[in-house]
Amino acid sequence: MPNWEVRTSQQVARPARRAQKDMSIALDGLPLTTPKTGVGHYTFELAMALAESDQAHEFELVYPSSYPKIELDGNAGSELPKNLKLERVLVGPLARHWWSNGLPRYVRRNRIELFHGTNYDVPLWRRCATVLTIHDLSLQLHPQTHQKRSVRRGSRRLPLMARVADAIIVPTKSVGAEVCERLKISRDKVFAVAEAARASFRPTAPAEAAAVRRRLGVRDNFLLAVGTLEPRKNLLLLISAFEALTQVPAGSDLQLVIAGGHGWLSGPLLKAVAESPVRSRILLTDYLHDDDLRGLYSSCRAFVYPSIYEGFGLPPLEAMACGAPVIASSIPALIETLGNAAQFFDPLSSEQLVEAITRVTTDDELRQHLVSAGLLQTEKFSWKRTAQATLAVYEVARKNFAGRR
């Protein structure tokens, strides 16, 4: 690692000096206005854990009325801690410009002392201390896997947001190093705070998992992949590997199940599935809620995560928490997150992926080792630890903000 290596969550989470008064803290609620994927789950789980970890502070998830009302689904539960609320801010023609006008005005009027931008954005008008979470630098490092307008917007806004924020949270040291180098940010304000699998992910009873499979049309012997259908997830390679695998005994009765909503640039993937010679053995389930995912994670022959770039890697960690053996691409963030509990392969090599799947599905000793190691690996992460480390970063941000005034 370069000499500007960022601090880890353990280093950040040293006992912080209690603030002289309780804080009013707002988090970006916009990621919760659509069905939750990675950033949405991060935002909600963090907010819940923060409120439960520090009941002296008041927390809110704030968003403008120009977006749909947040509805808490059954997976997340419907009851919030007393010190956490959803705040849908009524906005008019001017305040609809949320980041430049509506949010700064709300922060000032409601005396918010710290705003946490959980989805790459913070208000540019500095009314309070700000913390920015940068989940990854996919737009900068792999622009070909995103829509051009998203790349243009991210190229303009993210460097500015990173400079304005009083502290930056990243999910892994590898992303922290990229942020420091690519965005020219001082390591002194970048902190690696690991995420965690949600509590709903745990091994499921065989009968419950079988019921989920029957309802979704999933066979007993299947490979599972989870993630939004977008180029970065590298699912075209998985389909190619699966087609090759069906030609050998190890894959003669396997089904490939891909769970995830349609994302950007998913056309080539859908075309590949439609034209695949083994189309009848590939199932696209679309977006699934936790109960269904838990059943699939708990009963798959192996979970495969071929992504070419990630900031952390929640789906393989969720799979491990449910007792699935995990096969993952050998990229820095996944190696950092999954440790020695996964079977890694080169995400550019279909042959290596076929070999990895064959090994895991035919070698019972290896498979059991991965299951046991995965369950142990997930114990290293919890949202309570994430919240405690995040609270310590908030203290750093407040000091930095006070020093810049």
Image (cartoon, grey):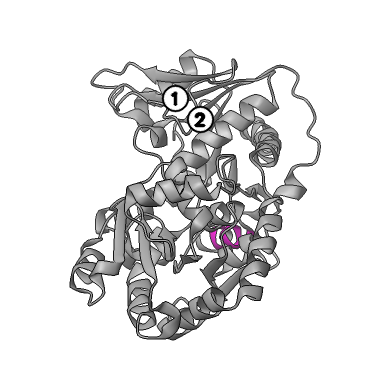
Residue at the spot 32% in from the left edge and 54% down from the top edge:
217
x then y, percent, for residue 256: 37, 66
What residue is disc 2 on? 27
How many numbered callouts? 2
Would residue 291 be counted in the magenta stretch? Answer: no
For residue 259, above or below residue 369: above
Report, in whole angstroms, how far the alpha carbon at label 1 lies from the one at label 2: 6 Å
Quarter of the image holding residue 139? bottom left
Residue at the spot 57% in from the left edge and 55% down from the top edge:
317
Amino acid type at mark 2:
Leu
Q: Is residue 23 left or right of residue 312?
A: right
Residue at the spot 24% in from the left edge and 70% down from the top edge:
279
For residue 27, above or below residue 1: above
What residue is disc 1 on? 62
Quarter of the image holding residue 32? top left
Amino acid type at mark 1:
Val
> Helix, strand, or loop for circle 2?
strand
In which quadrant will I find the N terminus?
bottom right
What's the magenta region? Answer: 173-179
Quarter of the image holding residue 254? bottom left
> Helix, strand, or loop for circle 1?
strand
Of pointers 1 and 2, the one earlier in the residue sequence: 2
- Dot 2 crowding, Cα within 10 Å, few <14, some 14–19, many 20+: many
Would residue 175 be counted in the magenta stretch? Answer: yes
| Main SS, magenta residues | helix
